Image (cartoon, rainbow, N blue to C red):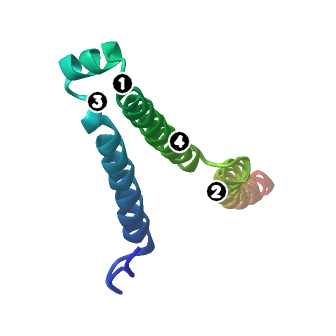
């Protein structure tokens, strides 16, 4: 595979490599299928008693199956790449929990400050009421 230009990101490089792989698989599949396309000819070859025709059909069938297996393996590998690993899922869950914890800690601090402010106001009001009662 050719080296990607330096301006491409790793994701672009991976996508380009994946595209080249799939194109190679499709080309191999097409090359294996092309000799099998004319159905009338294949039927005639199947009825033929010449062993050379039978060998060609078997060879094309084998080539087709090999190309199909490569294509299937490629698609299976793509599925595996798309699914996150257990480790990645746990890291994401931990990050979400940490963010939630941080948000709740900030909320607790905010509420503590509100409560402290209210306590201060209540002490001031209590002091005013006690002073008022002492006057009476």
Q: Nearer the viewer, residue 54 or 112?
A: 54
* Label 2–label 4 contact, CB within 8 A: no
Q: Position of residue 64 (x, y in %)?
A: 41, 36
The residue indicated by pointer 2 is: 99
Q: Please identify the quadrant where the N terminus is shown.
A: bottom left
Depth-wise, is mark 1 or mark 2 nearer the camera?
A: 1
Q: Nearer the viewer, residue 106 or 114?
A: 106
* Label 2 or label 4, whichever comes before in sequence order: 4
Residue 127: name its quadrant: bottom right
Q: Secondary structure at mark 1?
A: loop
Residue at 64 percent across and 56 percent down: it is 99
Q: Secondary structure at mark 3?
A: helix
For marks 1 and 2, give the CA distance: 74 Å
For marks 2 and 4, give the CA distance: 30 Å
Depth-wise, is mark 4 or mark 1 nearer the camera?
A: 1
Depth-wise, is mark 3 or mark 1 nearer the camera?
A: 1
For marks 2 and 3, give the CA distance: 59 Å
* Label 2–label 3 contact, CB within 8 A: no
Residue at 41 percent across and 57 percent down: it is 21
For marks 4 and 1, give the CA distance: 44 Å
The dot on residue 36 is: 3
* Label 3 or label 1, whichever comes before in sequence order: 3
| Label 2 neighbour load within 10 Å: few <14, some 14-19, many 20+ | few
* Label 3–label 4 contact, CB within 8 A: no
Residue at 37 percent across and 34 percent down: it is 56
Q: Nearer the viewer, residue 119 or 15?
A: 15
Q: Nearer the viewer, residue 123 or 18?
A: 18
User: On the rendered structure, is 127 left or right of 72?
Assistant: right
Total marks placed: 4
Q: Is residue 56 above or below residue 105?
A: above
For marks 3 and 1, give the CA distance: 18 Å
The residue indicated by pointer 4 is: 79
């Amino acid at each position: 595979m050719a080296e990607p230009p330096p301006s491409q990101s790793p994701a672009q490089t991976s996508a380009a490599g994946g595209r080249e792989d799939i194109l190679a698989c499709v080309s191999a599949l097409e090359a294996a299928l092309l000799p099998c396309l004319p159905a009338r000819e294949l039927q005639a070859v199947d009825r033929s008693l010449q062993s050379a025709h039978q060998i060609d059909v078997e060879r094309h069938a084998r080539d087709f199956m090999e190309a199909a297996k490569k294509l299937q393996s490629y698609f299976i590998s793509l599925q595996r790449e798309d699914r996150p690993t257990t480790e990645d899922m746990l890291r994401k869950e931990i990050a979400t929990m940490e963010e939630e914890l941080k948000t709740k800690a900030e909320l607790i601090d905010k509420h503590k400050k509100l409560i402290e402010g209210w306590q201060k106001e209540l002490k001031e009001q209590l002091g005013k009421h006690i002073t008022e009662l002492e006057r009476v």
